Image: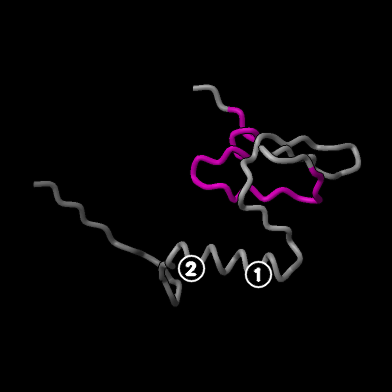
Amino acid sequence: QTSTSCELISNAPYLGTVNRPDFDMALVRLADKAGAEIREAESFIAYQRKSDGQVGITTDQTNFSAKVLIGADGFHSQVRKQMISCKM
């Protein structure tokens, strides 16, 4: 039998966890309220930086431009894979 012992050392007054689905929905609501366009039913294909400062974005359904691209597409992020090229 393997046993692991951990000690948390922190001066923080509070340490907690959040329910990820609830946290994600709260972020979506805040982004929507701030004017973000939420695109859920599309799959990201690629992006390209444009000379005017915009980001050109290609999905499986359309092409569009945006001021920013937020890659909130999960652990196996396609956005991150394009941004960070790693050879293993």
Residue 42 picture location, percent across and down = 63, 45
Direction from residue 51 to residue 36 in the image, left or right? left
Which residue is found at the position 41% from the left and 70% from the top?
Answer: 16
Which residue is found at the position 74% from the left and 40% from the top?
Answer: 62
Residue 79 picture location, percent across and down = 63, 40
First in sequence, mark 2 or 1: give its number: 2
Direction from residue 14 to residue 45 in the image, left or right? right
Residue identified by numbered label 1: 30
Query: Which residues are the magenta region?
Result: 64-85
Residue identified by numbered label 2: 22
Instruction: Count residues near mark 2 (Cα–Cα under 10 Å), then give few for <14, some for 14-19, many for 20+.
Output: few
Amino acid type of the residue that numbered disc 2 sits on in the rendered structure: Asp
Q: How is the image coloured?
A: one colour
**Is 80 drawn above or below residue 25 in the view shown?**
above
**Is 13 drawn above or below residue 61 in the view shown?**
below
Which residue is found at the position 69% from the left and 66% from the top?
Answer: 32
Task: Tell whether position 66 is magenta.
Answer: yes
Find residue 21 and name its label.
Answer: none
Total marks drawn? 2
